Structure formats: structure tokens, C-alpha cells
Amino acid sequence: MNKIKQAFEHGKALIPFITCGDPSLELTEQLVYAMEEAGADMMELGIPFSDPTAQGPAVQAADARALKNGVTTDRVFETVEKIRCNSQIPLVLVTYANVVFSYGAQRFVQKAAQIGVDGLIVPDIPYEEQEEFAPVCQKHGLALISMAAPASRERVQMIAKQAQGFLCCVSALGAAGDEAGAVEGIAQLKKLAGEVSDIPCAAGFEIASPAQAAAVAAVSDGVFVDSAAVQLCGQYGEQCVPHVAGLVRSLKDAVRAGQ
């Protein structure tokens, strides 16, 4: 059975994100194990890129640190292979089109699938421009995960109809930090998607507290955590693992409460 589907079968899924190689690839591996033990249902692993425009300052800084450490796509793949020797948690790679193209799209997707990656998110490729990735991902059984933001009903439903793995619902807080508005936006996205598809909808808006995680879990099928774990990696460096595990544990408890 598809591992991504399994992540949503036992309640609301918690999906934390970390940047591979920050603070080191050895600790990336240990972080995955620690987060899985703390309750993570799926992991998003970022391949560092020099210009991560879709991410905020914390992830941009983590990418810079990882690149300074000499992290490459091949070294990320080697780390995933090590993880797969000890864990079957669903793994989704998050990277940019330039990374995939420079590696070779066919070669990248084939390698990712061979080593046990379950999905791919390329945030700088709009849904309408996925044709260069979609066929090769389908060929190798790698879910090309689409993102949806509040927009026209027609566009959200078009994306939902074709979505693979899960639908990544993004609702920004906005300048005023309007959490209620962001949660309402997520609820509306899920409602629109649910009218045309049974694809799970995971959502987030820079989740940083258990209360925020619970609020999002109440209106979605899962919660992704963009930068909170990344910030702890930057703050604690080589001692980050227990701090990240504690964060994930508290967020998972909140997600359960929000079900």
C-alpha cells in the first residue's frame, strides 16, 4: 500500500519539515528517527538550494548552512538510503525546479523512487506547468504533490481532481497575523477539494505552537510544519535532536486533540 495514504489512515497526520544537512546529514538521519518516534506520520525533507524563494527566512538560512556544509543532491540521496534501512516512514522531498533540472529530471525521479522516496514537492512549479515532471513521476510511482491556495473554485477543484499523494493546502496568515482567517481559508480549500476528490488535504501557515496545530487539524486531514523544527536546528545546532523531538511530540498531541 502507498505509504503516503497510510499516513492519513490513523487520524490526522503530522508532517514536519527539515532541511537536509542542517546541522549535518548525520543529524538529519537521527532527526528523522527521533521525529518518527515522537509521533510524526510523514517527513518532508528539503534539498538545500541557493535561492529558496518559496520559503521564509529560517529555511533560507538553513539552506545556506547546509550548502556551506557541502550538501549535494547525491549526498541527500545517500542519507535517504540510510534512513530506509531503519525506517519506513513516508518521505517527501521538497526542492526547486533548478535542482531537478540540473540533476536531470528522469535521473532525479528514478533515483528518488529507487531509494524509497514516496513523494516530491516542487514549490516553484505551478500546477499548470507540471507537464515536465508529471509523466516521469507517474512512470516511477513517485507522487508529485500539488499545492493549492485560496483562489477560484475552478482552479482549486482542477488541482484537486489531479492531485497525487495529498493536497498541500496553503493559507497565509497575512500582515495582521489573522490565524482565524487562515484557518477559515484552509477549511474552504478542503471543502472545495472534497467536492471533487477524496484526496487528503494537509495544511499549515508557519505552525509554531500546539494551539495552531490543533486549530488546523480541526479543519484538515493533516498538519505540515514548515519552519519550527528548522528554527530549532539553527538555534541548537549539534544538540538539536531532543529539542526537535519535544516540539514534534507536543504538536502531535495537539493534532490528536484537534481531530
Image: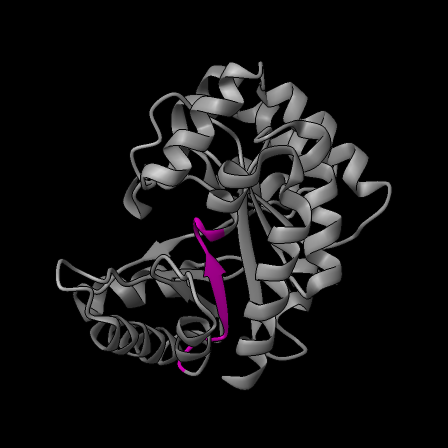
Residue 165, above or below 52: below
Residue 57, above or below 69: below
Q: Position of residue 188 (x, y in %)?
A: 27, 77
Residue 170 can be seen in this image = yes
Residue 226, above or below 246: above
The N terminus lies in quadrant: bottom right
| Residue at 32%, 47% in the rendered image | 127
| Residue at 60%, 52% in the rendered image | 244
The stretch drawn in magenta includes residue 220:
yes
Q: Position of residue 237 (x, y in %)?
A: 58, 34
Q: Which residues are magenta?
A: 219-228
Residue 41, above or below 72: below
Q: How many marks?
A: 0
**The one of 16 and 22 positioned closer to us in this rendering:** 22
Residue 200 can be seen in this image = no
**The one of 176 and 151 positioned closer to us in this rendering:** 176
| Residue at 47%, 15% in the rendered image | 102
**Quarter residue 37 falls in:** bottom right
Q: Position of residue 51 (x, y in %)?
A: 33, 24
The stretch drawn in magenta includes residue 170:
no
* Residue 118 shown left or right of residue 221 in the figure: right
| Residue at 69%, 67% in the rendered image | 6
What sort of colour scheme is used for the picture? Answer: one colour
**Quarter residue 252 falls in:** bottom right
**The one of 76 and 5 positioned closer to us in this rendering:** 76
Q: Position of residue 52 (x, y in %)?
A: 35, 31
Spot the residue most to the right: 85
